[in-house]
Each structure stands twice: as structure tokens, then as C-alpha cells.
Image: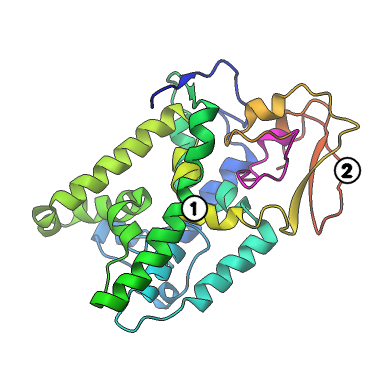
Amino acid sequence: MFGMHRHRVKTGGGKGRFSPQLVIQLLSAALFNGYAAGFGRGRIFTGASKAFCVPVLNCYSCPGALGACPIGSIQSMLGGMQSRFPFYVLGLLVLFGAVLGRVVCGLLCPFGLVQDLLHRIPVPKRVVPRRIDRPARYLKYVVLAVLVFLVPAFAAAETGVVPPPFCKYICPAGTLGGGIPLLLANPGLRQAAGWLFGWKTLVLAAVAGLSMVIHRPFCRYLCPLGAFYSLFNRFSLYQLHLDESRCVQCKKCEAACPMGVEVTRDVNSPECIRCGACRRVCPAGAISASFGGGKRAATPRSAEDI
């Protein structure tokens, strides 16, 4: 990306070891994609649980997926033969957003885990200049409004059934979890794959390549689910707290933040994914977290809890 420069500050977050965050991410990915037999058979799980949405970006077409993706479900309901408003799906997302905010992004999303693991690859890291980074972050809200809601709803009213545009043309999580495993297991699908799969593979490759040098580029700039949950960060039940009387302004929290949040200025920024990196590196134990708005006692730097 034009204008990026080297990241000369080492970041925290438990690299090289199984941090609590990584353990939770791995367990979450295994839970949402627990139908292991599907990968061997090259078939999508069709059990009763597939009628229910999971709270993360997790492709319906992934052979191991036990539930439906909320973003795909919204598009399918708005753009289906009998266009319906997705009350159930939005209600589920509002519930998780109101309680956890973007904790879902930081700890539960399988594609967030993929980006985190790619970023551990020892290649030179880069920081996107602020003049590019800040405006680019609004792109995910455009994706949410236009591709997830407006296009399916209006196009279906004009032409009938509309394929989910975000899933069809952009979603790299679907390509990785659904498209590639299904094509590998089914020779017939490989022969039928055309330009669209090539385009989606290119998008996935671009996101994967950027993830090695920039922390969570898809979460920062493109993910519509992250955009939705970010709307709840400032007033969700789960909140971070910065004790200004203990803060020594060392800025280690901001250097460690994978999302580039100015922690000392806006600890509950919409961009914060509540991964706990800032808390783990704070030498003064000035950052804490709690449910319900009450401040919890801060913990020293050596503590491993998130």
C-alpha cells in the first residue's frame, strides 16, 4: 500500500506463545466449525443448527460450519424471492453488540484468528500513514450499508432474487473457509470454477498478504460485521477503563494495539476489538475492564488475563 512505512516499535500480545486470547480464538473457531467430517467429504453440514446464526463472520458454505453467517443471512433474507426484513439476525447482532461490543471481533471471529496468525509470520511490518488509514476505516461502513443492506433490498425489488453481493464478490472468509475446501474435495466444482472464483482468490491473497505486514487489514477496512459491532463499543456492557491517575503516558498500550487505537485518548474507540493487548503491556496497570460500567481494580503488567 502506497505510503506505508516500517513499524519500528515491537508490539505485545503474546507472540510466540499460547496467550489466553489465542486459546479462546482457537476454541471459538473449533466450536463454530466443528463438523470435521465435512472437510473430508467436501459437503456442507445441513443439520438443524444450520438454521441459526453464529455471531461472527463464518461462511455458511464452509464444510465444517455448524451455523449460518449473519452477514450472509441478512443479504439472503433481503434479496430472496420473498424479501423479508432480518429481524432475528439483527436482534442477535444487537444482543451481542450491546453486551460485548467488538469483543466478538477480538476473541471469537475465526477470520480474525487467521489474520492474527498471518501477522506472526516474521516479515517486515508496516504502519499505514494516518492520512490514509483514518479515511479508509470508513470503507467498512459503506460495505455494510451498500452491499449488505441496500443492494440486496433494492435489487430484489427490481429484479427478483439477488445473490448476496458481499459474499459473492468480496468476502475472503468465505473463499478460505468455503470455496477452497469445496473445490479441493470436488473435481466437478474445480472444472466449473470460473473468473469469479479467480477474483475471490485474488481478494483473499491480497488480504492474506497485507495481514502479514499490517495487523488485521480486513477488520480495519472491509468487514461489515466489525462495522456493525463498532456502533456499540461506547455503550456496551463490557467496557475498558483507563485510570488517568495511574497512567504514566508511556504509550506502550498504543504501540501494542493491533487496531492502531489511541488508547490514552479514547480507550473505548469504535475501532477497539477488546483483545487485551493494551492491558497486558501497561506497566502501571492503568487499564482495566468490567461489565456494567463499574471500574474493576487494575492488574499489573505480568498478569495474563484478558
Vertical arrangement, residue 1 with respect to residue 98, above or below? above
Q: Which residue is mark 1?
A: 141
- The quarter holding residue 48 reads bottom left
The reply to whether the magenta stretch includes residue 267 is yes
Q: State the residue in front, 301 or 262.
A: 262
Would residue 38 appear left or right of 27 to someone viewing this image? left
Instruction: Find the magenta span and give its range.
Output: 264-279
Circle 2 Cα neighbour tier, 10 Å, few/some/many (<14 / 14–19 / ≥20): some
Q: Residue at x 72, y 40 (%)?
A: 266
Sooner in the amino-acid sequence: mark 1 or mark 2: 1
Res 54 seen here: yes
The reply to whether the magenta stretch includes residue 275 is yes
Q: Residue 92 placed where, x, y %?
A: 57, 70
Q: Which residue is mark 2?
A: 297
Would residue 200 appear left or right of 104 to someone viewing this image? left
Instruction: Check the picture and name the quadrant holding the C terminus.
Output: top right
Instruction: Check the picture and name the quadrant holding the N terminus.
Output: top left
